[in-house]
Image (cartoon, rainbow, N blue to C red):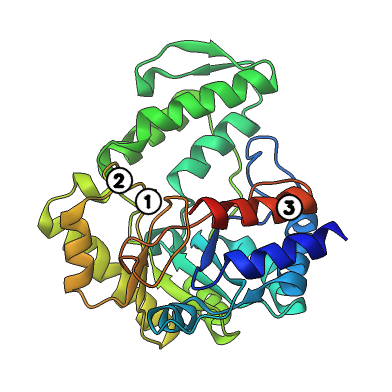
Amino acid sequence: MLHHLISQCLTMCSRNKLSILIYHQVLDELDDMRPGEPDKTQFDWQMQLLHKYFNPMPLSEALMLLRENTLPPRSVCVTFDDGYLNNLQVAYPILKRYQIPATVFVASEFSQGINMWNDRVLDLFKYLPANNINLSAVGEGMEPIDDLKKRRHLAAKTLMKLKYLPVQERLERIEKLYNNNGSITEQRRMMTPEEIKQLSDYGIEIGAHTHNHPILKELTLEQLNMEITQNRELLQQWTGKPVQGFAYPNGKPEVDFDEETVSRVKALNFDYAVSTQWGVARPDSDMFTLCRFTPWDRTPYKFHLRLLKNLIQN
């Protein structure tokens, strides 16, 4: 009954408004070091709810209808950032079950044999058997990690110290972090080019997300061009299809990208670009700074209500 009432409200509030959901991973089982990532059980009921009460659409098609003021009520798009292997192995079977289209924005460097830098940090904190960790690589000393709370706190602190460094310096510091603490067995987390093509062949749209996942605002114009064009060319080569959508890494306006970044993406003839700014897309929205919404609620009712709240407030 409550879902039905919420659905009626959504129909009234969602005219010419598009909700774009953003995910990164869908885990086979919950991970203590990644508490914000849904597992397959949570993702399943979320997609079931979208199938039953919403109008899921491919992002490119939804944006075309939005521009024409013909977008159906309760329209929603599902997107993923980075190119995780579990997008193919865990998320796709669920998307297929509920006939949910999706777009995956891929950072191409990590499809060639190395995990995302942030995952390498999280995995070190997760799997390091010692009760202390040497953080001299990020300007700290020996720190205790003898319980989960300390591991989470120090991992988050380490990620923030590394996040806005130049790509090469960030990678060097992570290697030093590993060298100072001994090795762990890293599981492969990212899709290969062959797996990206497989996902594309299944009908999932593939979008650009830069090559190295840098903070675009910090790059020179030459570096910016290289990051975007190399990424797009590789994805088009791997999939055999044009890549027309772009997602800004990290994605916060004026923090991670700026007007110059947006101008460059437009000049490279993309059709649209998405951020991580919360909100909805409207017919008058800038198609190169589109808002997205992170669906982190743990129960169906809260998830449904949050989607409604996002539409009402935006």
Badges 2 and 1: C-beta atoms under 8 Å apart? yes
Mark 2: amino acid: Asp
- Work out whether 171 lies above or below 19: above
Q: Based on the displayed image, in which of its 4 quarters is residue 259 positioned?
A: bottom left
Nearer mark to the viewer, of 2 and 3 = 2
Residue sitting at x 66%, y 57%: 26
Describe residue 26's horizontal placement relative to residue 236 as left or right.
Answer: right
Q: CA gap, disc 2 to disc 1? A: 6 Å
Instruction: Kindly identify which numbered label has been placed on residue 251.
Output: 1
Q: CA gap, disc 3 to disc 1? A: 23 Å
In what element is the residue under mark 3? loop
Name the residue carrying label 3: 39
Crowd tier of the residue under label 1, counting other residues whose Cα lies within 10 Å: few below 14, some 14–19, many 20 or above:
many
Disc 2 or 1, which lies upstream in sequence? 1
Residue nearest the observer in this picture, 51 or 73:
73
- Work out whether 144 lies above or below 240: above
- Residue 179 visible to the viewer: no
Q: Based on the displayed image, in which of its 4 quarters is residue 102 positioned?
A: bottom right
Q: Position of residue 177 (x, y in %)?
A: 43, 28
Residue sitting at x 36%, y 46%: 252
Q: Position of residue 51 (x, y in %)?
A: 73, 74
Instruction: Kindly identify which numbered label has been placed on residue 256.
Output: 2
Mark 1: amino acid: Gly
In what element is the residue under mark 1? loop
